Each structure stands twice: as structure tokens, then as C-alpha cells.
Image (tube, grey):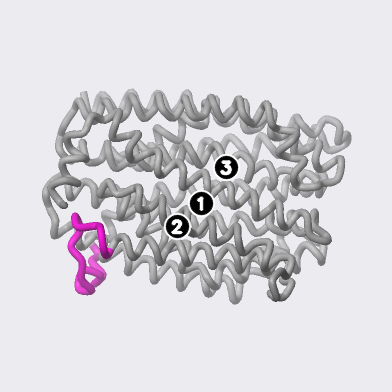
């Protein structure tokens, strides 16, 4: 089994390998985005749904932060594990996997403590509406205290992907998504004898789905991941291994955390203009994830392939991974742009929003979507930078597209539109400006890295 997996990563044509690994990940990521949308749709159509949807928007940055730390750690594990296997160092690969589990325990403990003590102060920085605050606190506290599902799934997902077993991570992701979607209406509306839990029901459905994904991914890792040696002794903390994981993974954590911080900052900026803009932005953010998550899924295939090839010192496979990874990502984003531009109105209508909020959401969908192709290029290059051990370059791209070129521009444009809500669409131009400028910077960094590390 080990030889078969190693042969696939080292000998299968890169175009075919990208598709065979990428398509399952893309499907699972898009389904993840779909159940986020379904979750919001169920919440928005309950009594007081628009306020509840606003509450989910306020909670979303911390949910993203949980994912950021889990996935960022997983990225470091993914790249280091792939590289170790490419170098035929099975002992180090086993220690990488074991230390990933130890790190998962630490991360979970931190978020549980935040769930108990930090949720209310955090929510109150974004809203003064008591109904919204209570709903957000209820939802987010449940998600944080039960964070072990999403944290450990993020880690075991990357352990499977690193050895070419992305189909199993997809099955795990899909299973959890199905559980979440099935439980949402039952727990939110109180069907089949279940008590009517409202926003709390949405949170319970989410964490139960995450735990299901983790349990299935763990099963596949233990049963099918023969490339990695297993044993509790491999989980003993190893400072050297942990340092290597975070040298690679910390930029990815910061990149994802910056997205969380950006959303938090945008919530505050938009709240200063009009509460409906916050709800509209939160809704759009979940709709656009359906496309962006596909790009993230392909990036998660690009990273181990390029990293494995880099460990082998195989120049042709490295360059093929870069070339076809970028081309496939741009194709996905172009298709996504077309779909959202055409279906913006019917997608936003699903959520039963008030006229002004729905209008803001439609304008956000149609305007921000123009930036998708540039965003896709930035996402692909971030994965490539991580695979080549250029985490700083990946971090620079994240800072540019999610902080440096977003919040100041959004704040300035919000001052322009504040006196006249009819011009609120101007704020959405922030994201086009950010992605285009970042893409120029990313290409320049890639040319330098290619010259230094590959050519």
C-alpha cells in the first residue's frame, strides 16, 4: 500500500494527479460551503430570522479563527509529512502525524476556555442590539466549547490528503455536512419531538456534523493510511517537529486569521453605516464561499503535490504542479464568477430578507464577484509558496488581500456612502481593489521564488 501511494504521488502525470486529488477535495469543500448556506437559510426563515442571521455574522469571525488554527496547523503537517515521505523518512513522518494530534488537544483547550469566558465580551464589541447579542452568544458559545470536532477533523483531513488519500477526507467531510443539513431543521424548528432550539439548534447541528466528520476521518486514518506509522509514543511533544510544522503552518494560520480579523473589522465598519449592511455582507460571504472554497480545495491538492515533488528535487513535476494548479484554479473561478453573476437575485431571495437588506446582498454578490479570478490566482500562489517553504511570501499575500488593502479602503468608502444608502454598493469595490493589487504583488513574488528555488 505504501509503495502504491508513493508511486502515485511521484509518478502519476501531474495534470491527472491534480484532478484525482483535487476533485474530491473540491467537492467536499463546496459541500462545506453549501451547508453553511443551508444553515443560514434555515436560520433566516425562523421567527426573527434577520436578527438571527446578523448574529451568525457576528459569530462568524471566531468560527473562522477556529478553522484558521486547525487548518493552518494541518497545512504545516501536510507539507512536512509529504516532504518527509518524498525523502523516504518514514520515522519523521510518523512523528509529524503524532505531534499534530498533540497540537489538536492544545488548540481545543484554548477555544473551550474562550467559549466559557470570552464570547460575550467579544460579541458586545460589534453590536448594541440585545436580541442580536444574545443569539450570537448562544450560538458561538456552543461552537467554541465543542470545537474539538472541527479542530481534529482539520488535522486528520490533512493527514489523509498528504498521502494522496483525499477521497477519504472527502467522504468524511460529506458525511458531516449531511448530518448537519439533516439536523438543522429538526433542531432549529423542533421537528420529530426535538425541542425547538432556534439559533442554538443551528449551533448543535453544526458541532454534531463536525464531530461526525472527525470520527470518520479518524477511522480512515487508522484503517487506510498505511504510509504513516502509528502509535501513542509518536504523540510525545517534539519541539523540533512542532517548530517545523509552524514554520510552514504559521503563515497559513495568520492568513486564515487575517480573514477572521477582516470580517470582524468589516462588521464594525458596516455597522457604523447601517445594520442591514452587516447582514447583507454576512450572507454574501457565505454565498461566495461556494466558489472560493473550490479554489481552496484545489490549493489543498496543489500544496502536497508540489511539496512532494520539491522533496524529490524533480523540477519538471514542480513546474507542472505550479502551471496546471494555476490554470485549473483560474478556470474554476471564471465559472464561479459567471454562475454568481447570473443567479445573484434568486440566491439572495432564498433567505427571505427585507427589501433593503436583500438589495445590499445582491449588489455585494454582483460587484465583489468581479474580483474572483484575481482572488483565485492569489489563493493558488499561496499554496505554491507554502509547498516551496516560502511561508513569508504566502503571509505577505494574506496581509495585502485581507488587511492592508481592505479595512482602510472599506473605512474610507464607508465615509463616502454613510450619508446616502443608495450608494452603499461603493463599499463593495474594496474587494476588487484589494485582489487586483495583491495579484500583481503575488506574481512578482512568484517570479523571484521560481528563479531562486526552482530554475
Q: Where is residue 267 in the image (x, y as percent from the top left)?
A: 70, 49
Q: Are marks 1 and 2 in contact (CB under 8 Å)?
A: yes
Residue 227 in the image, given as x and y percentages of width and height: 19, 55
> In which quarter of the view is residue 349 placed?
top right
Disc 3 target residue: 289
Which sits earlier in the primary sequence, circle 1 or circle 2? 2
Is tag 1's residue or tag 3's residue first in the polypeptide sequence?
A: 1
Is 330 above or below relative to 229? above
Residue for point 83% across, 61% down: 47
Q: Is 149 in the magenta?
A: no
Residue mark closest to the camera, 3 vs 2: 3
Answer whether residue 28 is visible to the viewer in this image: yes
Q: Mark 1 points at which residue?
A: 257
Q: What element carries label 1?
A: helix
Depth check: give the residue in front, 414 or 300: 300
| Residue 233 within the magenta-colored segment of the rendering | yes
State the CA–CA distance, disc 1 to disc 3: 16 Å
Residue 7, above or below 449: below
**Quick check: marks 3 and 2 in contact, CB under 8 Å?**
no
Element class at badge 2: helix
State the separation of the CA atoms marked 3 and 2. 18 Å
- The residue shown at (75%, 32%) is 363
418 lies left or right of 80: right
Label 1 to label 2, Cα distance in Å?
A: 8 Å
- Image position of 213 (left or right of 178): left
Q: What stretch is highlighted in magenta?
A: 222-239
Q: Residues within 10 Å of mark 3 (few under 14, many from 20)?
A: some
Q: Mark 2 points at which residue?
A: 69
Question: Within 10 Å of the Cα at label 2, are there few (<14), some (14-19), or many (20+) other Cα atoms?
Answer: many
Would you say residue 121 is visible in this rendering? no
Amino acid at each position: 500500500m505504501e509503495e502504491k501511494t508513493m508511486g502515485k504521488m511521484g509518478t502519476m502525470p501531474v495534470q491527472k494527479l491534480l484532478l484525482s486529488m483535487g476533485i474530491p477535495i473540491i467537492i467536499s469543500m463546496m459541500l462545506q460551503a453549501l451547508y453553511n448556506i443551508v444553515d443560514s437559510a434555515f436560520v433566516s426563515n425562523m421567527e426573527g430570522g434577520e436578527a438571527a442571521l446578523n448574529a451568525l455574522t457576528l459569530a462568524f469571525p471566531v468560527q473562522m479563527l477556529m478553522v484558521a488554527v486547525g487548518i493552518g496547523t494541518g497545512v504545516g503537517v501536510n507539507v512536512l509529512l509529504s516532504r518527509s515521505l518524498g525523502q523516504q523518512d518514514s520515522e519523521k513522518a510518523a512523528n509529524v502525524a503524532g505531534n499534530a494530534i498533540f497540537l489538536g488537544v492544545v488548540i481545543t483547550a484554548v477555544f473551550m476556555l474562550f467559549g466559557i469566558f470570552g464570547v460575550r465580551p467579544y460579541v458586545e464589541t460589534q453590536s448594541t442590539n440585545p436580541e442580536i447579542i444574545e443569539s450570537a452568544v448562544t450560538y458561538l458559545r456552543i461552537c467554541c466549547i465543542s470545537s474539538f470536532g472541527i479542530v481534529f477533523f482539520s488535522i486528520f483531513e490533512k493527514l489523509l490528503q498528504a498521502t494522496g488519500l483525499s477521497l477519504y477526507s472527502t467522504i468524511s467531510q460529506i458525511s458531516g455536512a449531511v448530518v448537519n443539513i439533516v439536523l438543522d431543521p429538526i433542531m432549529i424548528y423542533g421537528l420529530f419531538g426535538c425541542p425547538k432550539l432556534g439559533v442554538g439548534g443551528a449551533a448543535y447541528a453544526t458541532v454534531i456534523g463536525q464531530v461526525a466528520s472527525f470520527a470518520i476521518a479518524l477511522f480512515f486514518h487508522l484503517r487506510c493510511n498505511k504510509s504513516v506509522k502509528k502509535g501513542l509514543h509518536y504523540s510525545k511533544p517534539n519541539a523540533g517537529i512542532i517548530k517545523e510544522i509552524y514554520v510552514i503552518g504559521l503563515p497559513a494560520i495568520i492568513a486564515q486569521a487575517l480573514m477572521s480579523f477582516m470580517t470582524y473589522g468589516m462588521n464594525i465598519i458596516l455597522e457604523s453605516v447601517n445594520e442591514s449592511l452587516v447582514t447583507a455582507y454576512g450572507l454574501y460571504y457565505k454565498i461566495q464561499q461556494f466558489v472560493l472554497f473550490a479554489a481552496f480545495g484545489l490549493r489543498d491538492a496543489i500544496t502536497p503535490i508540489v511539496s512532494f515533488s520539491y522533496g524529490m528535487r524533480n523540477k519538471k513535476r514542480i513546474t507542472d504542479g505550479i502551471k496546471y494548479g494555476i490554470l485549473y484554479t483560474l478556470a474554476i473561478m471564471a465559472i464561479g464568477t459567471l454562475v454568481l453573476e447570473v443567479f445573484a437575485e434568486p440566491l439572495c431571495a432564498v433567505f427571505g430578507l427585507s427589501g433593503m437588506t436583500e438589495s445590499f446582498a445582491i449588489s455585494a454578490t454582483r460587484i465583489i464577484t468581479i474580483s474572483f479570478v484575481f482572488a483565485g490566482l492569489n489563493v493558488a500562489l499561496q499554496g505554491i509558496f507554502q509547498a516551496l517553504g516560502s511561508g513569508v511570501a504566502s503571509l505577505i499575500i494574506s496581509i495585502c488581500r485581507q488587511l492592508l488593502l481592505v479595512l482602510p479602503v472599506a473605512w474610507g468608502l464607508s465615509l463616502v456612502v454613510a450619508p446616502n444608502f443608495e450608494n452603499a454598493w461603493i463599499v463593495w469595490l474594496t474587494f476588487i481593489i484589494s485582489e487586483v493589487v495583491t495579484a500583481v504583488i503575488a506574481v512578482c513574488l512568484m517570479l523571484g521564488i521560481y528563479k531562486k528555488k526552482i530554475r
